[in-house]
Image: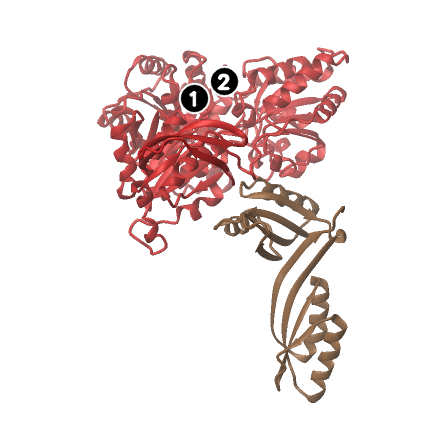
Chain colours: A red, B brown
Amino acid sequence: MLVWAETAITSDSMYSCILTIKIMGIEMMTTMQSMTGAKALMTAMEKEGVRQVFGLPGGANLPMYDEFARCDIRHILVRHEQSAAHMADGFGRVSRKPGVCFATSGPGATNILTGIATAQADSAPMVAVTGQVPVAMIGRDAFQESDIIGMANPVVKYAFQPRTAAEVPAAVRKGFYIAETGRPGPVLIDIPKDVQQNESEMVFPDEFKIRGYHPWSDPDIVAVEKAIDMLLHAQKPIILAGGGAIISSAFAELQAVAETLMLPVVTTFKGKGAFPETHPLALGPIGMHGHAEANKMMTEADCVLAIGTRFSDRSVGTFEAFEKRLKIIHMDVDPAEIGKNQTAQIAVVGDVKASLRVMIKLLAKNSTRLTKETPWLKHVKETRAYWKENLKLHPGEMGAAKILRKLREILPSESVITTEVGQHQMWASLFYDVIQPGTFFSSTGLGTMGWGFPAAIGAKVARPDVPVVDIAGDGSFSMTENSLATAVLEDIPVIVFILNNSSLGMVAQWQRTFYDRRMIGVEQSRCPDYVKLAESYGAQGIRAQSMAELDGAIKTALGSDVATVIDIPIDPEEDVLPFVAPGTSLSDMILPS
Amino acid sequence: MWAILSILVENKPGILFKVTHLFRSRNFNIDSISVGVTDNPEYSRMTITTVGDEKQVAQIVKQLDKMIDTVEVRHLDEHKTVYRELSIFKIRLSNANDSMEINKLAGAYGAKIHDVKKDSIMVELTATPDQIKAFEELARPFGILDVARTGVAAIQRSGA
């Protein structure tokens, strides 16, 4: 990595001077000041536009914490560092700017690892800043020393450990740049305590070059032309939109391509809501718990335009069954995704929004007439209509589908949803239709239980103007429920919507399905009482045991200026269906009987 | 297939760890590895040989290329590349004829003889891994006491 700069000091004042700095041939003025590494960290973050940090202080990051007293960045205190990372993640996914979390050395740093790995698995922009023991103590097994750089290496996009105070501004500048460009991801900046304390003349670089980093490439026009040709000649073409379509907010472009070519749209679970799920061409997510109509049509299609997806096993089932049948056009910003899980006939590397724009331009010039009523499209529409009517649902009043459709009915379309991980998450995928693209977020790659609630808090900080709801299960919510303290004390009124089956429901479903109903380690025994738990934190707790109560509870929560937990007891025996068992293909989907 | 990868990296601490970690975490094997600074002290060159099918090798090249600390990653064409590995063998001398036989063998492979003792002899051979393997097979009957190998260093020919 290289930052080359020719500097000329034009004033020799001891504490502040104007520098003319020539970087990549461009002359620019920059201010050089003497300050501590901690102060430089906060100053550099302010320059990046950081308004708040989620974190928890400790011995090794106290110098940077002391700087909160002297800057405009808000500190949001968590009760466990993992939650700080998830909050930063939620903030980053919604705002598409890196969320920032702080943790101290040793256990503070290891506690955020799960959050960093979650952000990496879902390509979320994040900057995690950890304190470290002083440079001279590194490697001596000092108190609260952990080799967080070594531990985090496989789950970060990049990691910095400035060894002198003067290195801090460039680490921050490059860290933010790396986190938010190309395929986004988490960046770790690990700062030894003495580096935070030492004073140095600081240069805050505006521009720089990183030799080995090429976040974007221009889409290959010839490849896009070939892709159009392949789609026009396919009998049963389909679009598969992944998380990349959401990350690059290619919503309008995706819709334009789908409508111009009259292509039905399925998504991955991560791509849920890249395309309005109420649109006549929308079939919803495919995968292990995909929509029946989506899995059926994906299985029958002969050509797929895959946009920003890694073809994860949870989406496609067995890799072989998928690629044998299909012609694949793969658009992705990350060249390493091309051919990793599926072999594509045509690959378009580049930001998917830019690639789709090229496609739209070329389509405008293309004279091939499109028929709006192909036999395929007719079949798709019939299948969609059939499964919208005929998917067998839980018969009880408080079945998952009815509960989530009620939530959808009441929530404004711009509301932001996060989910925890488990059955409720898959029910949300099946029964909560995303109307406004880019308003649904979940831990889809790592599947981190406890993600949804802190992520909702981060999302609410990014979008205080819209309701933010964490669709939760009791098991997953338990893992980070102490974030209620943050929601209440920091005045971040999110809604936690618990489908409470008093068990680790997804594990229970697998034990019922694959382990002959031997139920081991899944019973939660109605402990705790979530209404009382919420109240003990000063939040609002409401139990909803009927549709009428649920209706009232959602409306009360939307009108409340304090965080609200809605506890909805449901049948512990309700399974998530359809279900594609692991290691099988989408055509082997188990349907409700 | 056997593949030679030539990776130009930033000459900074921790990069070797990251590269080898990538091989481990992505389920690839390192057959041999050699690392040294280039004529420009800002860079090091790593030469890694690995075994995998075409798809796997293409994937590891992409994953290496994606690493921010790698400046250039090339999958070298074996037939257009000069590649050599240095090996040192310590071989047992059991009877009077052995020394002469090993000398003949070394001569045939262009190897150098070092440190001749009463009961052992050291041979230094710089060659391709295949040639080293062949030499090893021929030396085995004498009794190989120790082997050290450097891993392959390689540069593709100009215009190739």
Which amino acid, mark 2?
Val
The mark found on residue B39 in the picture is none
Instruction: Work out whether residue A468 can be spotted.
Output: yes
Which amino acid, mark 1?
Ile
Residue corresponding to mark 2? A434
Q: Label 2: few (<14), some or many (≥20) within 10 Å? A: many
Snapshot quadrant of residue B136: bottom right
Q: Where residue B105 appears, x then y in whole percent?
A: 74, 76
On whether disc 1 and disc 2 are found on a single subunit, the reply is yes
Q: Determine contact: label 1, label 2, CB under 8 Å.
A: yes
The mark found on residue A417 in the picture is 1
Residue A513 as seen in the image, left or right of residue A36: right
Viewer-side residue, A297 vs B132: B132
Examine the rendered structure and indicate whether residue A547 appears above or below residue A166: above
Q: Say which chain tag 2 marks.
A: A
Viewer-side residue, A127 vs A474: A127
Examine the rendered structure and indicate whether residue A237 appears above or below residue A187: above
Quadrant location of the C terminus of chain A? top right
Q: Label 1: few (<14), some or many (≥20) within 10 Å? A: many
Q: Say which chain tag 1 marks.
A: A
- In the image, what residue occupies the spot 70% across and 22% down? A237
Viewer-side residue, A123 vs A403: A123
Q: Where residue A474 appears, x then y in whole percent?
A: 36, 31
